[in-house]
Amino acid sequence: MKNDIELKSKKYNNDLFLTYGEEAKYIVEKNWKNHLKYFLEYFSSHIKKDNSKTTLLDVGCGAGLISKELLKYGFKIYGVDFSSEAIKFAKIENPGIDFQHSSIYELPFSNESFDIIICLGVFQTVADPDKAIAEMTRVLKKSGILIIRTLNTLFLLSFKGKKDNPDYIFYNPFDFKKMMEKEGLNVYSLKGIYSFLKRFNFLINFLVKTKLYKIFNFLFFPIFVFLSPGFYIEGRKNK
């Protein structure tokens, strides 16, 4: 079943850009707008005054929305995606970034190539998460950071999410943490992605602006893990 989900996702992403062309980029940006706010807030501790020597890989980069945003901070960015059509648009839109068509299971890089790897909104369609984590860890430098965002099966309304999105895979965040640790990563940060119905999207701005999400994360377990549709997790590769 998981293999079917992964194949459907590949077909959907390719078909999206083949069908809508340039417009597909705006469809993706609209869906990612609120997740981007959370990501930049959580990722901010990794942004230094000078990031020019920090190599960053965006796995599942799509049309390059996140990569383009991070390029503003001076990171040396690479991006990979299983959708060849998405990569075509990423290259056109972002000539300053090295984008490649690639499987998450066979990344086209040498061992210990990157300081930071991000993988956002990808694992809900990954058939073999253990293998994917192992491969990203392979190309991560010692003491490098792996950041993943995916869907939370402990969310109180996850049953609705599974019904509305039968082609998505949901994860228990604490089991996911163990998966990462098994591959040699020291997981030191597990946070919620608190989103709402579209008509209440203004509340996301409020949570980020007021930093209320910090209280939610402090009480992530045993309370707010059940109120978070997704989770954000960071692990550092052991030396």
Image: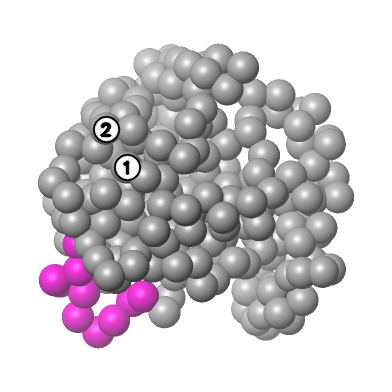
Q: What is the C-alpha distance between the residues marked 1 and 2? A: 7 Å
Q: Quadrant of the N terminus?
A: top right
Judge whether residue 208 can be spotted in this image: yes
The image shows a total of numbered marks equal to: 2
* 184 on left or right of 8: left
* Residue tagged 1: 135
Instruction: Judge whether 163 appears above or below 150 on screen.
Output: above
Foreground of the two, 47 or 25: 47
Magenta-colored span: 46-55
Picture disc at residue 102 = none
Was residue 54 drawn as part of the magenta stretch in this picture? yes
State the image coordinates of residue 108 (x, y, percent, origin top left): 18, 37
Judge whether residue 34 can be spotted in this image: no
Instruction: Judge whether 197 appears above or below 191 on screen.
Output: above
* 162 on left or right of 64: right
State the image coordinates of residue 73 (x, y, percent, origin top left): 27, 70
* 235 on left or right of 58: right
Mark 2, Cα crowd under 10 Å, few <14 / some 14-19 / many 20+, is few
The answer to whether marks 1 and 2 mark residues whose Cβ atoms lie closer than 8 Å is yes
Q: Residue at x 43, y 75 (%)?
A: 44
Dominant SS of magenta comes to loop
Q: Residue at x 32, y 42 (%)?
A: 135
* Residue tagged 2: 106
- Which residue type carries mark 1? Glu
State the image coordinates of residue 66 (x, y, percent, origin top left): 38, 53
Was residue 32 drawn as part of the magenta stretch in this picture? no
- Which residue type carries mark 2? Glu
* Helix, strand or loop for disc 1: helix
* Helix, strand or loop for disc 2: loop
Q: Residue at x 48, y 31 (%)?
A: 128
Q: Quadrant of the C terminus?
A: bottom left
- Which sits earlier in the primary sequence, circle 1 or circle 2? 2
